[in-house]
Amino acid sequence: MRLALIGDEGLGAMTQHAHSPAGVVPEPRALDAAATDAMQVRAFSARDIAERVTRPDEALAALSRQYRILDTLRQAASQLVVHRPLPELFELLLDLLFAAVPAQRGAILLRERNPDRLELKASRSRSGRPFVSVSRAIASRVLEEGNALLLDDALRHPAFSGSDSIIHGGVRSAVCAPLWFADGERDEVVGVVYLDTASVVRAFDEEDLGLVTAIASVAAVKIHTARLLKESLDNRRLQEEVRLAAELQAGLLPQGTPALPGFSLGAASRPCHAMGGDYYDWQLAPGGLRLALADVSGKGAAAALLMAAVRALVRASWGEDDLARAAAGISRAVFDNVPASRYATAFLARLDPSNGRLAYVNAGHHPPVLVRADGTVETLASGGFPLGLVEDAVYQGGATHLAPGDVLLAFSDGVCEARDAGGRELGVERLVELARSGRGLDAPALAARIERAVAEFSGEAPADDDRTLLVLARART
């Protein structure tokens, strides 16, 4: 990165690396023998020495400038070393810049979401008036080239004289330095500092450029560190919020199993992320045992929120005698209140324990299977569209009967579509065989057996969908 002086004639010849601020005296080079001999025989008169002592010369002026820069850097480093939130850090940086150079207005701009654009993070004017009209032409050039710019007369410079912000702001002189950061592996400009003045008496000079660039170099490291820390804290906070949300979602699942003589219930649910869009539910009421299993479109937090809404709607409609009418009401509520791209497939059922009759409606869900005691299989597909997919969905209810020894298995598509390391699907047939071979087990044991079998089939292959299953078994007499 270089410092580039811009006057009326364009870029000047002076260049300097960002780590060597303007005014720093370079290290002396080794002198050859001839030069050493010449110095040894050179004489100075008493008058010359007296004049050098009593009259400041260019070397003393340069030393004074160097001291000012080093003192400014010392102050900047001592004040910036303390950790501060980014807004406070920006205000402190403006304090340091206004103390160092005679700017009338100043601003800090950073790269954020779009790396090719700068976002205004802080600005100030000595007059106290709002200042938001930063010269984007100057700032963009510094961002693109990584060079600090000094304009001693912005209104007359051909590259910037036509800029609206310079004309309307009455900018006479401006200096802009990159917030340049390097950690050994990368070299990055994270933003810029911009200062300008409308004064015709005091324009910025090379010393001002060196001071601004030096402060910007120190501040860039601190800004980068503060942003990393903020990102880390934000990530921790987000992880904690996700953990709490996952616990809350898990708490929405049934925490116990109702006592139902002659029948047993079992279930399992594993989201592929921290939160998922599958759920199962049951409730024992005077009208019988109510059952539900649903799969919301999508994954993650958005699906989890919709899942909670669907669960609430289902519970509010469970009192309906007609499950088909209840499904239509739920579907309309989902359609009216969620984005068009969101919907849920669901299987809703009601069991009469006295006779084993099961009424159900299938809202676009993968048909559950009823494995009979003799090994035959019945699929429960009667229903209609997924919930919320169409505005006025109509559903058709179905009914069947669970005899002693029969097993009902409802599942989300994440179970039957589970894949092994080779990409092969588990498939419904394997699920049926697992249910058929486990007919002698009660529902919790069979659900656990199927869950283990799916996990063993998948092995180390990552799950790409939530996996939920529900088992209702009638004991043999």
Image: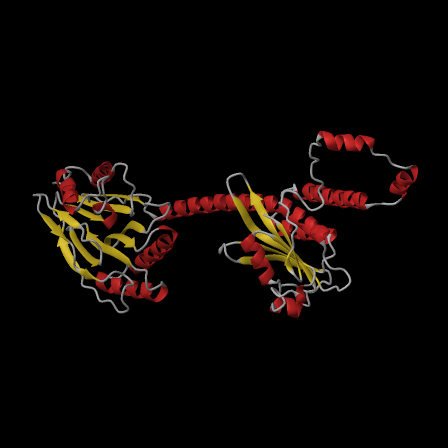
- Residue 171 against residue 414 in the figure, above or below: below
Question: Residue 345 appears at what percent x and percent y?
Answer: 26, 57
Q: Which of 439 and 152 is in front in this view?
A: 152
Q: Left or right: 317 with respect to 103? A: left
Foreground residue among 211 and 52: 52
Would residue 273 be seen by someone viewing this image from the given angle?
yes
- Residue 222 in picture, x, y percent from top left: 61, 44
Location of residue 151 in the rendering, given as x and y in whole percent from the top left corner: 67, 59
> What residue is drawn where x is 35% and y is 54%?
303
Q: Is residue 40 above or below residue 175?
A: above
Left or right of 288, for residue 83: right
> What is the x, y in percent for residue 117?
52, 58
What is the count of numbered marks?
Answer: 0
Image quadrant where one finds the C terminus: top left
In this view, 347 is above or below 256: below
Most foreground residue, 280 or 11: 11
Apparent side of residue 462 relative to residue 70 in the rendered image (left or right): left
Foreground of the two, 239 or 143? 143
